[in-house]
Image (tube, helix red, strand yellow):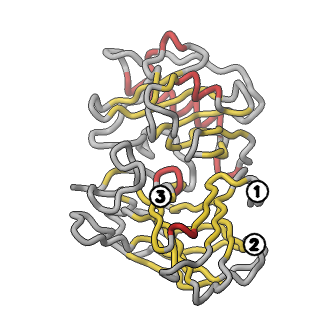
């Protein structure tokens, strides 16, 4: 992992083979591990293989602390982060911290957390040849250069937290890591309640965030390029049944801001039941080159006079294999 190491490409190929053989196809596995992230991250399910997640630990948190947040203990094999300035990947191995060059992480770092199958088998020590090298311009591991979930899938809350509150914001209550009502295998759901106020409507956009815009960026900077995504899928259910909510993707176009979403697609107003239902928004043929608001819900007083409570789970863009920032 140190600078100047020889045979990086050979080592990278070896790493890919080892991880793919060890972990198999992640989409067929069950989430038997999880990581407890500080607020607003919550608990995230982990699958055998390399999980692409956004960390919410404070700046300067030791990589070992991230490893210790994973349950069961001993599951983590390695932790990787792309260093854009140096155009290389930095890694941490619990089995060989002395050979690691990723010793600390920062708030909202996008990392690859590689875990075993939950049986806590011995972890192979990394070699100097096993440090991945990014392609020029890549913000995360390339689907051809490092193992990625198959099919490719972007977990929306990990990169677009539910930060953009709108309308009667004083009437919104949100728990992004609710454990009382979940859709297995996800360990948590997002619980949302809304009591109508003077504006008669409310909603939340799931926005790109970073250290400069912890409450969400409404278009001051480019979003992410999600080209290749075929659909947006999510699960939802109501507390009582009969709740009416509009769900949409894209559509952020804030006056005076230099950047806007390059698409907008609404599912329309749907009526929720007390049972979990999966919904899908078709994205085929849309321009996804700059996505600022990945997902949103909107509820109105007219459709829900007494207010409503509902739950969301597993919001994801299907078909996103490589995450890159949109062009400025």
Crowd tier of the residue under label 2, counting other residues whose Cα lies within 10 Å: few below 14, some 14–19, many 20 or above: some
Q: Is residue 153 left or right of residue 118?
A: left
Residue 7, disc: none
Q: Which residue is mark 1?
A: 184
Point 67% across, 46% down: residue: 45
Q: Quadrant of residue 142?
A: top left
Q: First in sequence: mark 2 or mark 1?
A: 1
Residue 221 in the image, given as x and y percentages of width and height: 27, 55
Q: Nearer the viewer's eye, disc 2 or disc 1?
A: 2
Quadrant of the image for the C terminus?
bottom left
Q: Secondary structure at mark 3?
A: strand
Q: Are marks 3 and 2 in contact (CB under 8 Å)?
A: no
Instruction: Give how far across and how far down residue 88 sits, in percent.
Output: 34, 29
Measured from the top left, where is residue 252 in percent x and y? 36, 70
Q: Nearer the viewer, residue 99 or 169?
A: 169
Note whether 228 is above or below 51 in the view shown.
Answer: below
Q: Residues within 10 Å of mark 3 (few under 14, many from 20)?
A: some
Residue reaching furthest bottom?
Answer: 302
What residue is shown with label 2? 239
Q: Residue at x 33, y 16 (%)?
A: 3
Q: Earlier in the sequence, mark 1 or mark 3?
A: 3
Identify the residue at image location x=50%, y=16%.
127
- The residue closer to the viewer here, 202 or 154, is 202
Mark 1 burial class by Cα count in 10 Å: few <14, some 14-19, many 20+: few
Q: Residue 163 has which mark?
A: 3
> Which secondary structure, mark 1?
loop
């Amino acid at each position: 992992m140190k600078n100047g190491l020889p045979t990086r490409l050979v080592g990278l190929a070896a790493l890919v083979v080892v991880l793919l053989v060890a972990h198999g196809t992640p989409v067929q596995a069950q989430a038997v591990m999880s990581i407890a992230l500080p607020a607003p991250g919550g608990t995230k399910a982990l699958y055998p293989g390399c999980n692409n997640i956004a960390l919410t630990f404070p700046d300067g948190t030791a990589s070992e602390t991230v490893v210790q947040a994973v349950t069961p203990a001993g599951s983590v094999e390695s932790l990787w982060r792309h260093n854009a300035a140096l155009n290389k990947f930095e890694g941490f191995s619990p089995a060989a911290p002395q050979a690691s060059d990723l010793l600390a992480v920062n708030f909202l770092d996008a990392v690859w957390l590689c875990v075993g199958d939950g049986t806590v088998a011995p972890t192979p020590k990394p070699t100097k040849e096993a440090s991945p090298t990014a392609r020029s311009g890549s913000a995360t591991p390339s689907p051809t250069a490092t193992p990625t979930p198959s099919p490719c899938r972007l977990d929306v809350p990990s990169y677009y937290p539910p930060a953009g509150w709108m309308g009667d914001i004083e009437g919104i209550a949100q728990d992004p890591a609710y454990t009382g009502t979940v859709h297995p295998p996800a360990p948590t759901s997002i619980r949302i309640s809304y009591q109508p106020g003077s504006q008669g409507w409310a909603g939340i956009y799931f926005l790109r965030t970073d250290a400069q815009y912890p409450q969400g960026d409404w278009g001051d900077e480019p979003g992410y390029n999600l080209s290749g995504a075929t659909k947006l899928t999510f699960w939802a259910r109501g507390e009582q049944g009969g709740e009416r909510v509009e769900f949409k993707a894209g559509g952020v176009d804030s006056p005076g801001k230099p950047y806007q979403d390059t698409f907008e697609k609404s599912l329309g107003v749907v009526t929720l039941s007390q049972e979990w239902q999966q919904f899908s928004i078709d994205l085929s043929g849309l321009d996804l080159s700059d996505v600022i608001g990945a997902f949103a819900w909107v509820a109105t007083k007219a459709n829900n006079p007494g207010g409503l409570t509902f739950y969301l789970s597993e919001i994801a863009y299907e078909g996103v294999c490589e995450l890159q920032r949109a062009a400025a």
